[in-house]
Image (spheres, rainbow, N blue to C red):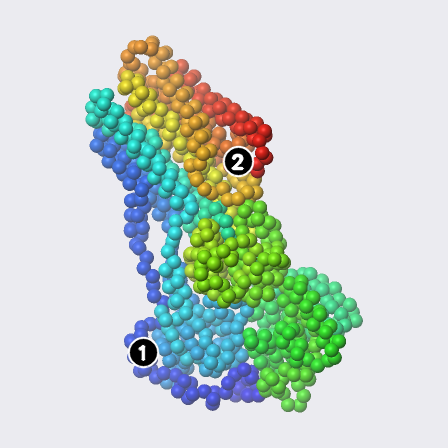
Amino acid sequence: MTVDGDQGRPRPSGALDARTVDHTARAGLSTDEARARLVAVGPNELPRPYRPSAARRFAAQLVHAFALLLWAAAALGWLAGLPQLSVAVVAVILANAAFSFAQGRRADRAAELLNFLLPTWVSVRRDGVPRRLDAVEVVVGDVLVLEAGDRVPADARIVVAGALLVDTSTLTGESLPTSVEAGGIVFAGTFVVEGTADAVVTATGSRTRLAGIARSTSLVTDHPTPLTRELHRVVRGIGLIAVAVGIAFFVLSAALGQPVARGFELALGVTVALVPEALLPTVTLALAWGAEQMAHRNVLVRSLDAVETLGSTTFVCTDKTGTLTRNEMTVVEAWTPVGSAHISTPGYDPRADLVLPQVARAALERLAQSGARCSRGYAELHEGSWRAHGDPMEAAIDTFARRLDLDTDGPRARAFADVAFAFDPHRRRMSVVADGEVIAKGAPDTVLPLCTGGAAERAAVAAAAAELSARGLRVLAVAGRSAGGVPPTVAAQAEQGLTVYGLLGLQDPPREDVAAALDACRRAGVAVAMITGDHPATAAAVATQVGLRQADDPVLVGADLPADDAALGALLDHDGVVVARVSPEDKLRIARALRARGHVVAMTGDGVNDGPALREADIGIAMGASGTDVAREAADLVLLDDHFASVVAGIELGRATFVNIRRFLTYHLSDNVAELAPFAVWGLSGGNIPLALGVLQILALDLGTDTLSAVALGAEPPAKHLLERPPVSGRLLDRGVLRRAFGLLGPTEAIVSMLAFFATFLAAGWRPGEAFPGGVTLATASGSAFIAVVIGQAANGFACRSATQVPAALGWTTNRLLIPASAAGFTFSLVVLLVPAFAAVLGQRPPGVVGWLVAGFAGVAVLGVDAADKAWRRRRRSRGPVRPAPGRA
């Protein structure tokens, strides 16, 4: 036993005497040498990744395919002598860019935030004396003086260790602190949990392991989300069709002898009619609504595209501790040879109900008291709630002792044991010598061989340990003996001739809602795998307990994963797999391999080591309560409560968002059909029938009346059955959307609109075969056609709420935004129709009585045709095979 002269108390046996350490290493560098190395190598800080400027990112929003299409439309409008149209289209372009930049911009600062894992001030020994200096001044060869609570500023080799425990979870994912002895390595960004150490710096700045993770994080490139890819496809398709049809009308106009300027105007009108200018802002607002709803479910969205991507998820890779479990270790059963205690209250609150036989109370108290004294962690009351200080497992043992009404005296009873032999991952046990007693605590298979007793007694203990383990509990054995006259000074001398005091069965309780959430994932066609840095036995037990893993599901170890990504993907590609002891590189490869097999992968994580995998996955999900800033910045979503059930809630809302985008895409395209109809009639008539709608009227319909209703459709509540079938993501323009927009709702609006147009001419005295009048009559007829489209679209908004149910079945007011949105759009249309100044710009006048009557019929026609179609399809489905009810989708 050694004695610390400063403290006047024994020093733990894990420390090497200073006299055994090289004197130069103990003295550290000289000031001049340190200064020279700092100049030669540079400061101890991580390299900052390149990030494009805000102006450059905003400019990128102005030159994508959809923006270029609108720029072309604005240029054509200017050439055709329609400056109002050009200004309006440019305004749309800027609005789109602003939405995409402000809402969709991802602050890619994950690698930068790694710098915050390096401490600001550190203690080093220079010129033989301790000094405090800025962490950026640390150089290779410096001797770090580490104490409990310090963050390690650089990679370093331990030369003196005093019962040193280091929290490496941010780098390795390992949930338990690691014992580091002399000769071992500590890494930048890790924490000293217990003990003291002197360590010689071996790597700084960009040469540390932490910097390697930073490089991995920054090198992972963003990949387009499923929604982004599909929107690009839709925009590209619509754009090509719009341009092709516009060119066709220009050629037709020229063939009919129309002036070139008139041909430009017609071509531009067709293009504008087919291009849903408000599509991208509406999509962005729908995603923003989804993000807001997710926030109510404790899911914070950092990237708007992630809203829909989460709904497209087919494979979730989840962490264990804190996500599937509560991260609150609890002793739920304590076994002694004379009886057992059972505890059902989780957490660290000393108040709990215990079930135990009185005959075993003395043995249980000895077991609890000894286990608590052979621990450093303890439970403490903080701001009204009990929490773990240090190792949660040791805090649980301390709590168990308190629940037996034992005075553990917190850390003071154990802070300075006479001799302490720290936990070693190879020995898988620790021991102390305190108050004349040797106490050992660890895995049963490492403690029991050190104990005395007959074969029957040893068999009983082993059987009890096996039974507790089979129930998924983490089992610790506690044993002890009298230290004798001379306390032992080495572990081998202390840990022999022990007597078994008992076994402690500990459990990190699963969250109450995890089982239901996992069942929901299976019904929804989403596979779930556990990816953790913990021991495979612990991971398997927890996975089985929460219902993630079945008996025949594999438990894999990171070191044994195949090197080939294709083989890795095939090995992992099923529900219920568990992968333990994974490294940051393993998680990155897992995400990449599953994506290569066509999965949309969601990856949860909380540590620095998770950053690259969170970036590689289609959807990175960070823990908000327990995660690091690095993980949160690398992720697309942050779980504010760390609950796995929140992931499932997010999947439901993501699916709802995708379905909502289909809804308002159907709504937009139906309007496009009604807007294109006047040009088709004009072309088919050889130019004899005048245009019912002009370019500016079409723009007013798209931006002034449709946008708000489309946004309201983007906020439609989720259908009841979204999680009862596989992901709904796929084609936005699928057969159902095309059929309803181009074969049903759009043609109905177009027919009624043209009827209102012709009825106005008939009411004014025009008869078929005569030339169509111009001037006031044409403007009035155009106004009738305009308001007919407005009324038809108002009804269409309610029809598009569901592809299977009529509005009355859903409830007319269950979408609280749609009625005010429709009212606002109708009010706008009345302003541009009835106010002479606006009406003159658009080339229209208020309709007459006949025009109003026919236009008013548009709403009835749209809802009637929609109801008839849904009733016909219901009857058809009832005669065919039974299919899952799609709800509102």
Q: Residue at x 49, y 37 (%)?
A: 716
Q: Secondary structure at mark 2?
A: loop
The numbered disc on residue 888 is 2
Of residues 210 and 627, the one nearer the viewer is 210
Q: Residue at x 42, y 50 (%)?
A: 303
Q: Residue at x 39, y 52 (%)?
A: 223
The numbered disc on residue 154 is none
Q: Position of residue 734 (x, y in %)?
A: 44, 36
Report which quarter residue 238 is drawn in: top left
Q: Nearer the viewer, mark 2 or mark 1?
A: 2
Q: Position of residue 611 (x, y in %)?
A: 43, 60
Q: Residue at x 30, y 10 (%)?
A: 770
Q: Residues within 10 Å of mark 2 (few under 14, many from 20)?
A: many
In space, the residues marked 2 and 1 are separated at their CA atoms by 68 Å
| Residue under label 1 | 37
**Can residue 696 be spotted in the picture?**
no
